[in-house]
Image (cartoon, helix red, strand yellow):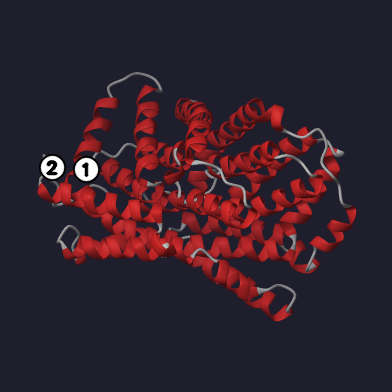
Amino acid sequence: MQGKHHRRKALPDLKFYLSLAVFAATLFLVIRRPRNIGIGYIALAGGFVSVLLGLTTLHEIVRVWDIVWNATFTFVAIIIMSLIYDEAGFFEYAALKLAELSGGSGRKFFVLIILLGAVVSALFANDGAVLVMTPIVYSFLKRSGVGRRSYVAFIMSIGFISDTASMPFTISNLVNIITTGYFRIDFLTYAEVMVLPYLASVAVSLGILYLFYHRDIPDHIEINHEAERLAVKDMAVMRSAVPVLAALITTYAVTGLLGIPVAFIAVPAIATLFIIVSRRNTVDTKKILKEAPWQIVLFSIGMYIIVYGLGENGLIPIVSSALAHFSAFPGPVPDILSGYLFAFLASVMNNLPSVMLGNLSIGSAYHRVLPYVNVIANDIGPKFTPIGSLATLLWLYTLDRKQGLRISYTYYMKVGFLLALPVLTITLISLWAVWII
């Protein structure tokens, strides 16, 4: 699949600038959301304009779908599973147990909740983690009567770890699924390479978040034992979480060696879980379907179409040339510089289209470590800006609308850059270490 791009040009021409204009206009409208139009509809409209102007052909749309269908279906299935277990009370119950383990200490709870977020992100995808963890942590803090600075410390940390810890498995992040599918990396091989970078990212993220926010963490958080009983809506469903996840991950690993797409396992398995749960009438499955990330799916497809055209009309050779220049440096420097480039692209154009651009650029001069560099950069790099991750845009919007907690873009970017840059750098170095050990 790699390296077959027939319409690449040596230098950008009019089509390149038109593609860039369509992309910029679409992203601007996604951020502004005029009249609260769904971001998915905006992106699809941009994709339609790209096709109408001849910037992306119908043949290329078919190729885009061939690249992203597995990731799209798997992503929706994983998020629906996370919402099922959230409705059953699994995540709130786990958080309550951590509160008990902390003995009411705000600092211990801060550390434990970040570690929980890292596990949830790894198993239920980054969007699932931030979606379910944010309201749970918010309700904890509300009961404890803490100030706004404490809210911001916990909520920003949950948002941060949800992305920086979303790399150990292919199912942990949409960009992981896209990249492993494009380069045909099986589930087990990917996990073996990424376990050390994952541990490094979690450790550094935890340390930096604690150092940055330790003054804002409350001394005490309230432990509500009655809330533990009320959190559980369906004990049988809740207890099924661990065996179901273990069975799924084992199946992903085995079938991955046979070249079977992850979606072929995730979709029927989670659909079966959904049907079983819906028949028990203890979990609101209609609410789950309503809250599923359909707009993210539409957004990703629309943006993929736009960025594919942008890449084919001149951007791919530019990125490929930069990667070739970086390869001349010694040690981990090529991986670090390539990671910085991919992270920059993710922060300015959103990680969903940027990971595709990165894959297409790598494809012309394939190097076995670069796909992993691209994944790490597009998992962590989006923390530089609010527009780097669609989940972040939706998360900030929901915080402002539902919890009344407004986090300005200026504050987010200041904190994001200070925290994400060292995490990205050390994680990339740990990836380099994997290849020389």
- Residue sticking out furthest to the top: 330
In the rendered image of this protein, does residue 400 appear above or below residue 53?
above
Task: Describe residue 413's horizontal placement relative to residue 119 as left or right.
Answer: left
- Residue 371 sits in which quadrant? top left
Callout 2 secondary element: loop
Dot 2 or dot 1, earlier in sequence: 2
- Residue sticking out furthest to the right: 225
Counting from the top left corner in percent of width and height, residue 164 is at 54, 39
In the rendered image of this protein, does residue 324 appear above or below residue 66?
above
Are dots 2 and 1 in contact, CB under 8 Å? Answer: yes
For label 1, the residue is 315
| Amino acid at dot 2 | Pro
In the rendered image of this protein, does residue 288 appear above or below residue 398?
below
Which residue corresponds to the image point at 15% horizontal and 61% vertical from the top-left? 53
Q: Which mark is residue 12?
A: 2
- Residue 151 sits in which quadrant? top right
Label 2 crowd bin: few (<14), some (14–19), many (20+), radius 10 Å: some
Which residue corresponds to the image point at 89% horizontal and 57% vertical from the top-left? 226
Q: Nearer the viewer, residue 84 or 416?
A: 416
